[in-house]
Amino acid sequence: MEGARSEYPSNELSGSVTGPVVQAGPVHGGISFQVQPQPVTGPDVKPDQVPATTVPFVNRESDLAWLDERFGGGGAAGSGVEVGVVYGLRGLGKSSVVSRWAERCRERFPDGQIYVDFAPSAGRSGGGDVSDAVWRCLRALGVGERAIPAALEDRRALFRSRSAGRRLLIVCENVSDSGQVRALVPKGRGSALLATSHGRIGELAYDGYGLLALGPFDRRSGLALLADRCGAAAVAEDPQAAARLVELCGGHPQALSVLAARLVNSPRLTMSRLADELAQETGRMAALSVGAGEEYSVSAAFDLAYDELAPDAARMYRMAGLIPGRAFDAATAAVAAGTDRRSAESLLDALEAARLVEALEDDRYRFHELARLHARERAAAEEPQEARRAVLERVATHYLVLTAQADRALGEDRLRIADLTGFLPDACGPFGAGDAPLSALDWLEAEHLAILAVLRDGSDAGLHTLVWQLAEAFTVLFFRHRHLAVWEEALRLGAGAAAACAVPAAEARLRSLLSRPLMDLERFPAARTELDAAMACAQVSGDAVLSASVLEFDGRYWDRFDVERAIAAYRRSAELNRQADERRGEAIATYFLGCALDARGEHAAALETLHRAHRALLACQDHRMAARALLARGRALAHRGDTAAAKAALGEAAGVLREQRAEHYEAQAREELARVLHSEREHPAAVRAEVARAAEIYEAEGHPAAAGMRDWLDRLAGEG
């Protein structure tokens, strides 16, 4: 009944109340109250709110130096206040950098340091975030709670008044838009605002604010972090394994901290075993967690960044993560996502602003190593297997088209098994105009690791036809730039794919080509095995020109062991090419025949044969092979004792091969020229220059000849 007293206690309060309220029923005994005191208020309050660094600080000296330079001048001439934003992926240590810098510069801000973290209210509207933040700043400056107005603009005006005449440092963590920064810029000359953000806030650049992109640790800094957490002795015991851990984490400080915790918590777990565990990409993100909290999970940090993306940007993140390799351009991303290039560029800009990809100087993009793995994880969780395979097939086809076009743009009418004429929309594509051969070679050089990654992933996915066709077209790069390990792996993948497709002609071609890097690496039994398999496949194919090509490679093997068998192989190869009216093939076989005759001591016959080969190759417009024939003539002239003619031929050959960017053969020409010059003992500086250039090329290729060239350089230095 209304107005009646209940027999049970009730808890009701009406009206306006300020301060603590206590409601109680019957109380027996003494009562005491303890009320939390209100924050100190008044004009003399000096806030000191920036959290201290709780672990030893590792490196970041260049970033701290940037902050010193940015804030060291006491403010710009206009407002007298400096503003900077440190941005980067979660877990890179932005908070540590800011806290460390705040500790180092207390004297610059004698009126105190205020700290605001936007993370707790990140899910609310931007206006609410800013209003709460200004309220906290006013409280830190000693403004009583009742004196703080309710409206945001009134709060901002009061903050400007209270900060005027003071030198303050305002630290804002986890900002997400420019309004959060602008609202908290203090008014006092010599003051500064330093914010952290997980992404780039482009609008701030228009205001002239400083933007510092925080990147991952380099190897030295990563090793220093491991030494700090695990002990210097642990790193010194196995420095190679420690360096592998840094590399596998992409230098991500949070990831390295997680690994250090695992090592400390599991004494039997060695750095080497942990590195082997992380080498498996499929389980690496799971291995980078310890305990149950998000603070100790690298994947959780990336999840937060991913959840903040717009749906179309999140899809691009997943699709781009499926692109093989470490770097890609906007066109490849467009192919992966099934969109146009302009849309892809816009979405990649969004990912770059979120610091999930890095924009490189060559108009390509690169994932942080762990972001790439996370993107693949999200794709595996959200995209059907058929869709993921379709992405790989589209990207592999994209690379096949471009590689085949680059191959044809380089202008050699060489033997090709894959018939791609109906497959290519344009024979030379983007490489068909202007300085085409060089642009094609530049593209192949820039993309060679990406193409190898496509071959690997395509092989794993069973895209065998695409793999062998791409491997065949890819070979054109290695005729000029001898990346021996990459060449060998690419051809091995291609030969395996051709065998899986039961295309004996392709298998014969790729296995015969595979003998070349194996010979250069002095793995002669393996080269012999590939050549025997190539001969068997060529015989099954019934292709006479292919058989002639395999015989040419067979002759090059026998050049090392039995010159008579080499000469016989070259003569048979030239005959088969002549019968098939394959003029370039005949000219190349003739060139190698001339080299073999020179090796047998028949210098006059060699010079005549090489002269014929040189003319025939020029007629075929094959300037690279023609220069190689000229190189061989120079060698034969030197063997005959005609050093003047030898120097002229070798110098011309080296120049043409450099123009053709056939670096491996340029090195051979310079090595031969150095020997001729050295024999005259009149040109020590010229000899050193030629040997140094040859050594540089061989070292870049990973060629065994590099050691001999370096030894020769050392001896030349000793000769004075």
Image (cartoon, rainbow, N blue to C red):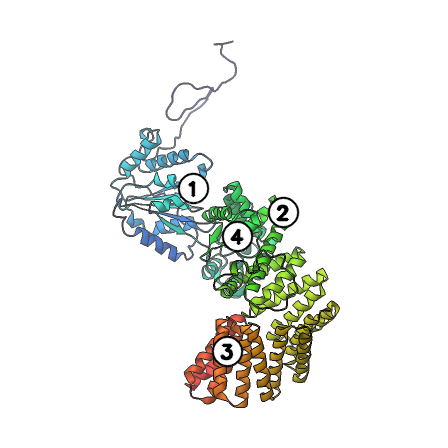
Q: Judge by depth and name the residue closer to the eye, 535 or 113.
A: 535
* Residue behind mark 2: 387
**Secondary element at image label 1:** loop
Tell me if residue 592 can be seen: yes
| Label 2 crowd bin: few (<14), some (14–19), many (20+), radius 10 Å | few
| Label 4 crowd bin: few (<14), some (14–19), many (20+), radius 10 Å | some
Q: Earlier in the sequence, mark 2 or mark 3?
A: 2
CB contact under 8 Å: marks 4 and 2: no
CB contact under 8 Å: marks 2 and 3: no
**Secondary element at image label 4:** helix
Mark 1 or 2: in front is: 2
* Residue behind mark 1: 176
Question: Residue 574, position in %: x, y?
Answer: 66, 77
Mark 2–mark 3 distance (CA, rounded to whole Å):
51 Å
Q: Earlier in the sequence, mark 3 or mark 4?
A: 4
Where is residue 719, by image quadrant? bottom left
CB contact under 8 Å: marks 3 and 4: no
Mark 1–mark 2 distance (CA, rounded to whole Å):
33 Å
Mark 3 or 4: in front is: 3
- Label 3 amino acid? Ala
* Residue behind mark 3: 653
- Label 1 amino acid? Ser
CB contact under 8 Å: marks 1 and 2: no
Question: Residue 221, position in %: x, y?
Answer: 45, 59
Mark 1–mark 3 distance (CA, rounded to whole Å):
60 Å
* Residue behind mark 4: 331
